[in-house]
Image (cartoon, rainbow, N blue to C red):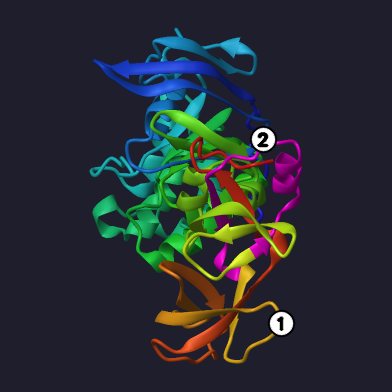
Amino acid sequence: MSPEPTGGTMAELVVENIVKTFGDVYALKGVSFSVKNGEFVVLLGPSGSGKTTALRCVAGLEKPDRGHIFIDGQRVNEMPPADRDIAFVFQNYALYPHLTVFENLAFPLRAVGTGKAEVNERVQNVARILHIEHLLHRRPHHLSSGEMQRVALGRAIIRRPKLFLMDEPLSNLDALLRAEMRAELKRLQKDLGTTTLFVTHDQLEAMSMGDRIAVLDQGQIQQIGSPDEIYHRPANLFVASFVGSPAMNLVPCRLAEENGQRRLIVEDSNWSLPLPPEVARAAQEGRAPSRLVLGIRAEDLSVSLSASDGAVAAEVYVLEPLGAETIVNVLIGPHVLKVRTRPTFTASIRQTVYMTWNQEGVRVFDAQTEKALG
């Protein structure tokens, strides 16, 4: 898609220490984040983490108990939703069933008295951007889920708002259509350059679409960073276990002397590893925690049917063929680790294999605070 400029103005969103309670329940506990001009930021978290509440506070549909929300430097806490110059795309599309696609797209413009010629021009332009020109005469009940989602996006785009707010807009689509719409929505946002805040519980959606991701859990921001930072350098055990498919392997470990050197020893196993630099520094300074957790991604592990120097013997627990790859689950002592392999890798359950690892992919967490070392 190569849309014509929409003429909308960009905006910067700043959220500072917002607190929101519902009775005795804290939905948000001092949440802070920002979205720069033209940036696509994703609020990612499980159900009940507070991400939709944060979005509704930005939209003005909920009023925070404490904290501040700024759009382009203007505090908007007391401003009605209609005056914030935002467009909200919901999960359920929210189309008018008795209106055609053309009339659904035109509705926001006619509501503010836009002239007939301009309405027609802007509807045709948005329909061309979203490839729905052939649907303009249809009503919503004659549309597929993907087509209804495009119309809902079009109704948001046509207003030329400062800020897009999107609450799981792709969750009602089937897997194939979701993948297609992820790519199209990301391209559309870049072409339009509109500041966007997007809510999802789907970490694949967040990783593939966001310029930055804010991970929430229990009403608090756990980490904010680029998809690469969130994936490869998780700030704590929650982020490590929530982001990634499969999730990061996490096993208990400790520091111990082995052949005159301090190493990481995985509990109840024959696996020991060199200390990562941040752990070595903490140990040297006497501030290394006594209880640690080792984290490593499935792609940073390798298995072979033949032994090699430094490899650790493991037992195949189960295989998960996924077409383009196979996830091999192996037992190291009592611990099950997931290893990403080529689809051509073949082994049988209970067979002995030999595991090696990429030392640069090793992450270590404090078992008590659950925070990453370094």
Q: Residue at x 43, y 68 (%)?
A: 336
Quarter occupied by residue 37: top right
Classify residue 309 as left or right of residue 162. Answer: right
Crowding around mark 2 (Cα neighbors within 10 Å: few <14, some 14 to 19, many 20+) is few
Mark 1 and mark 2: Cα distance apart in space: 32 Å
Quadrant in the picture for the N terminus: bottom right
Residue 21 position, x and y percent, is: 32, 17
Query: Can I make out residue 188 in this image?
Result: no
Q: Residue at x 54, y 91 (%)?
A: 344
**SS type, badge 2:** loop
In the foreground, 116 or 347:
347
- Give the mark count: 2
Q: Amino acid at mark 2?
A: Arg
Magenta segment boundaries in residue numbering: 273-299
User: Does 137 sit above or below residue 217?
Assistant: below
Question: Would you say the residues marked 1 and 2 are in contact, meaning their CB atoms lie under 8 Å apart?
Answer: no
Q: Amino acid at mark 1?
A: Asp
Dot 2 corresponds to which residue? 287
Which residue is farthest front? 260
Is residue 278 covered in magenta?
A: yes
Query: Can I make out residue 26 in this image?
Result: yes
Classify residue 122 as left or right of residue 36. Answer: left
Residue 274 position, x and y percent, is: 71, 60
User: Does 232 sit above or below residue 155?
Assistant: below
Classify residue 102 as left or right of residue 196. Answer: left
Quarter occupied by residue 308: bottom right
Disc on res. 241: none
Q: Residue at x 48, y 62 (%)?
A: 245
Disc on res. 309: 1
